[in-house]
Structures are given as C-alpha cells and as structure tokens.
Amino acid sequence: MSTRAPLIEKKQNRDLPQINERIRFPKIRVIDTDGAQLGILTPREALQIAEEKELDLVLVSDKADPPVCRIMDYGKFKFEQEKKAREAKKKQHTSDVKEVKMRYKIEEHDYNVRINQAERFLKAGDKVKATIMFRGREIQHSDLAETLLMRMAKDLQEMAEVQQFPKKEGRNMMMLLAPKKA
C-alpha cells in the first residue's frame, strides 16, 4: 500500500494546472498581463512579480525552450476557457447514422418513399445506411440488390456521396451514404 500512495499523489499533481509554486523549471520566459515580455527569469522571481500585482503565474507552454509562463488572473482565465468550450459544443453538430431498410423486390412508390427519407436525413447532415434484407433463398439474387443500391446512390448523387459501396453482411446488403460538403 505504501508504494501505491506516491503514484496516486504524482498522478493527482500531474492533473492539476501548473500555476504559481507548481511550476518546476530552472528558467522560464515570462509574459506580462498586457502581452509584453519581461524576459527569462527564475520561477521565484516571476512569482514575486505576479504576487506584487495580486495575480497568478500560469504555465502557458511547457514545450518551448525555455517554458513560457504568463502573469494573469487564473480564475478568470479558467472561466473564459470553459465559456469557449461551451460555445464550441453548442455549434458542434454530431452526425448520426440513419438507416433506410428495404427489400430488393420493392415497389416503385415504396422506393420513392425511401429516397425521400434518405434525402431528409442527408439534409439534416446525417449519414444514411441503406440496407436491403434477404429472406430465405432471396440471397441468391444479391446482384439485383446491388443494382438497386447503386440506383439509389445515382438518385441521391446531387446531395450525397457513397462512403461505402454495397457489400454483403450476413443476410443483408448495405451501403453507406454521407452528405456532400458544400
């Protein structure tokens, strides 16, 4: 148990943001609140400057040589980042995969209904998985099913591109269509 405690402690320290006393580099490049460079200092000197201004010393980039730190209000900085993340999440559209199922002996009207469904899904920005199901000996006519799927791809070519061409999966044949990028 005693060997495990330091590992947990190290992991928790790694997850914490590197601010103020947690910055452990011999020399760092310091940037002031207005974006002016104060030069290369020791973390202790930089922390003293930050404390005089009643602000925090925050590690911005540890990949640079020397690492870059900025003097700022960390609470405000963290709030702004969370706010930006929420805004980005609002604007993000997750594309789902919607399925359109049919049989290869489908009537013309039913086929048109499936085409309209697929169009509606594609306009909403979702991918469409067109599936043809086989029963019993119908699987012998997989060439007819493939022809039907290619016809569907041709009918939807103005708004969709084929992401995965027709392929057999067990007792089904499926094709994946994705909305065209405008």
Image: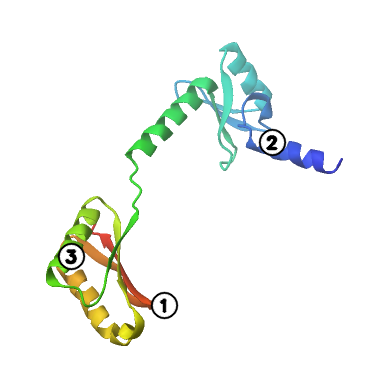
Q: Earlier in the sequence, mark 1 or mark 2?
A: 2
Locate residue 118: give its quadrant.
bottom left
- Horizontal and vertical percent for residue 76? 49, 21
- Residue 91: give its label: none
**Label 3 crowding class (10 Å Cα cut-off): few <14, some 14-19, many 20+?**
some
- The CA span between labels 3 and 1 is 26 Å
Say if residue 51 shows up in the picture: yes
**Label 2 crowding class (10 Å Cα cut-off): few <14, some 14-19, many 20+?**
few
Answer with left or right where residue 116 lies relative to residue 2.
left
- Image vertical order of residue 78 relative to residue 54, above or below: below
Choose between 69 and 77: the one closer to the eye.
77
- The CA span between labels 1 and 2 is 48 Å
Three-letter residue code for mark 3: Leu
Q: Which of marks 3 and 2 is nearer the N terminus?
A: 2
**Label 1 crowding class (10 Å Cα cut-off): few <14, some 14-19, many 20+?**
few
Which structural element holds mark 3? loop
Answer with left or right where residue 94 lies relative to residue 34.
left
- Residue 156: give its label: 3
Residue shown at 34% from the left, 79% from the top: 135
- Image vertical order of residue 90 relative to residue 41, above or below: below
Give the labeled residue for mark 1. Answer: 170
Give the labeled residue for mark 2. Answer: 12
